[in-house]
Image (cartoon, coloured by chain):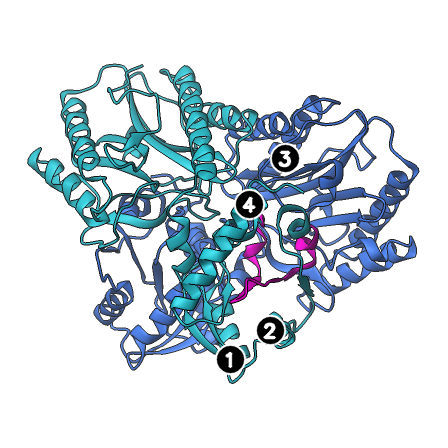
Chain colours: A cyan, B blue
Amino acid sequence: MALHFDRAEFEARIARATAAMAEKGLDGLLLFAQESMYYLTGYDTFGFCFFQCLYLGGDGRLALLTRSADLRQARATSIIGDIRVWTDEAGARPEAQLRDMLADLGAKGTRLGVEYDTHGLTARNGKALDAGLEGFCTLADASGLIDGLRVVKSPAELAYVRKAAALGDAAFEAALAETRAGADEGAILAAMHDAIFRGGGDYPANEFIIGSGEDALLCRYKAGRRALSDTDQLTLEWAGVYRHYHAAFMRTVIVGEPSPVHRRMHEAAREALAACEAVLRPGRSAGEVFEAHARAMDAHGMAPHRLNACGYSLGARFTPSWMDWPMFYAGNPAIIARDMVFFAHMILADSETGHAMTLGRTYIVTDGEPEPLSAALLDLFVK
Amino acid sequence: MALHFDRAEFEARIARATAAMAEKGLDGLLLFAQESMYYLTGYDTFGFCFFQCLYLGGDGRLALLTRSADLRQARATSIIGDIRVWTDEAGARPEAQLRDMLADLGAKGTRLGVEYDTHGLTARNGKALDAGLEGFCTLADASGLIDGLRVVKSPAELAYVRKAAALGDAAFEAALAETRAGADEGAILAAMHDAIFRGGGDYPANEFIIGSGEDALLCRYKAGRRALSDTDQLTLEWAGVYRHYHAAFMRTVIVGEPSPVHRRMHEAAREALAACEAVLRPGRSAGEVFEAHARAMDAHGMAPHRLNACGYSLGARFTPSWMDWPMFYAGNPAIIARDMVFFAHMILADSETGHAMTLGRTYIVTDGEPEPLSAALLDLFVK
């Protein structure tokens, strides 16, 4: 049994979830997001790549329907006592087995919330679910209900977030030690993950971003490595990860002499990050953080080079992405609260001159200034 | 520009796709699987975690709708010339922007195939898509159309698969060098990825499986590492990955003295793997491979300890899973053909006695015996 939280913490989370369900008039929840399952029960798997559903009743009852490969996984990692298996075979209809399970649990004729907005439920499986439960019970979209609870972290979760941040700092130190003219990007990536795995950390929910030369302007991972030139720019976006909790960071490291353009971009990024910090307070909105970033960038003439988003919440997320709800984009009304965790990333890419500059770190929201979770300086790193 | 295949190869793939569309009476395809986008155009990103759609017209025309963060990524990694951006903002409706794009491309009133069976299209986004295109064009489920092309590998793809397998062997050697009583699982994981990243390889589409002690019976990744005991069992499932092509392997390594139960389980796994190899031939079905495995296992009295599936196709896959179509399970009628790549995994977990044994490797299907892609012996490894 590898439970990463006390049973009492899981029980408190389940109590909050059932209270939120009652408020929405839901008799139960059909959970498909691995994040929700991990949060409520500890269940830890990538088996959500197949059809899999966790039922949470209004009385707190849990029942999982999954494949045989995940039966022992659920037993070993979660507090779920009632685990049922659907069998792979030609013509398998797990949605029919789900209906049978729900009938068995007395859920016929009830009103159930469904997590439709998750990679744990593909469009194909969503259609099968709707068809399979037609006439059996009433379904309502309950995406975001558990996310709304997950977004505020408990002290035990914040301890994992801090541990993740320490692993993130160790990964950056390891990267800097490898970064020089002639260094291979693959060796840098290897050193970063080495620090995290040896420190007891986990895989990130998405690939780290590593790009140099003209590809320093990209902000996604891609296959294919190169060696750094004598004068180069290396963009890294990474996360320390512990118990699936992420603390993300972003930097563009200069090899050789930074150009005046790099310096101007770095100055703009630093001011924009400071502007975000000033707004990252309880009661402000995610949209206001984006707008603070945009105003600062635009005041530096960086409007054509910035993105339409500048960060997001972080927590225990599973693939394909560590980006959690809510995100910093224009007009997002989501309200910031104490003990939320946010990654703010300032990204500038000037396709015309081929320059990139990025700067980002993770914060815990407090009653006052947000607490940055990294010992690394915000200075321009030059190697 | 980081294209991993010749333009001519992409063009040939697109020609095969449009021919398959014509056969199904489809005027165009709305592609949501990152695997399909990578296969047809090279486009390489984890941006499929958000709404993103690649249109392929019957005439081979390509147009991508994605977010600003992926604009340069698509330019840098793909042959897609027509890239359009939907903007994050409160109330954003990318499906409406998709309809506008399709109108612009003259697709109004046409019959379009949709990839619904992919993590690139969540149930929520699938509903939005259907509603957004209601009355504009006719949609048909075309999941699996591109998968059916991807499953047979070209010589250029097989070269990447072989490179992936070599990285997989290097990862296993690195793991064995770290495996001993007292060794930390995290150090083993670090060593494996170090070999792959330094060799120019990529992240796997799912986490490696690593479990020892009672957790050697699990076949999924989970957070939380332990140190190996003086007598222990260590289950590893990993893949060498190159240009996103996977070659997967699986082994249970014994620390100290293997028990007679381990030896019996290993013997059963080895015979079951040989039975699979005998059936892994052009013209046979995926179901027949599963049944060969099941018969051999059951003849050894292993029926209660085996899984309901024993392998699957491999290729260039993205998170959350490297498992590709088709899978070896009971009754699967999918026909095996030359130049397909399959991972066969023999997994035994005896919960009663707490013993685990696994054995698996990747093959290229030939006209004769399947070609195993690993230099590693099938013997029981003891450290």
Do the residues marked 1 and 3 share a common chain?
A: no
Q: Are the residues flagged by discs 4 and 2 from a single subunit?
A: no
Taking the image as shown, residue B49 lies to the left or right of residue B230, namely: left
Please give the chain letter of the residue carrying mark 4. B
Q: Secondary structure at mark 2?
A: helix
Residue B41's disc is none
Of marks 4 and 1, the one in the foreground: 1
Q: Which residues are magenta?
A: A43-72
Badge 1 element: loop
Residue at x-position 45% and y-position 48%? A320
The Cα–Cα distance between marks 1 and 3, rounded to whole angstroms, is: 48 Å
Label 4: how many residues lie within 10 Å, few (<14), some (14-19) or many (20+)? Answer: many
Quadrant in which the C terminus of chain B is drawn: top right
**What's the distance in space between the residues labelled 2 and 1, CA to CA?**
9 Å
The quadrant where residue B373 appears: top right
B4 or B234, nearer to the observer: B234
Q: Residue at x 37, y 48 (%)?
A: A151
Amino acid on which the number 3 mark rests in the picture: Gly
The residue under label 3 is B168
N-terminal of the two: label 4 or label 3?
A: 3
Callout 4 touching callout 2 (CB < 8 Å): no
Q: Is residue A267 above or below residue A367?
A: above
Disc 4 marks which residue? B206
Which SS class for mark 3?
Answer: helix
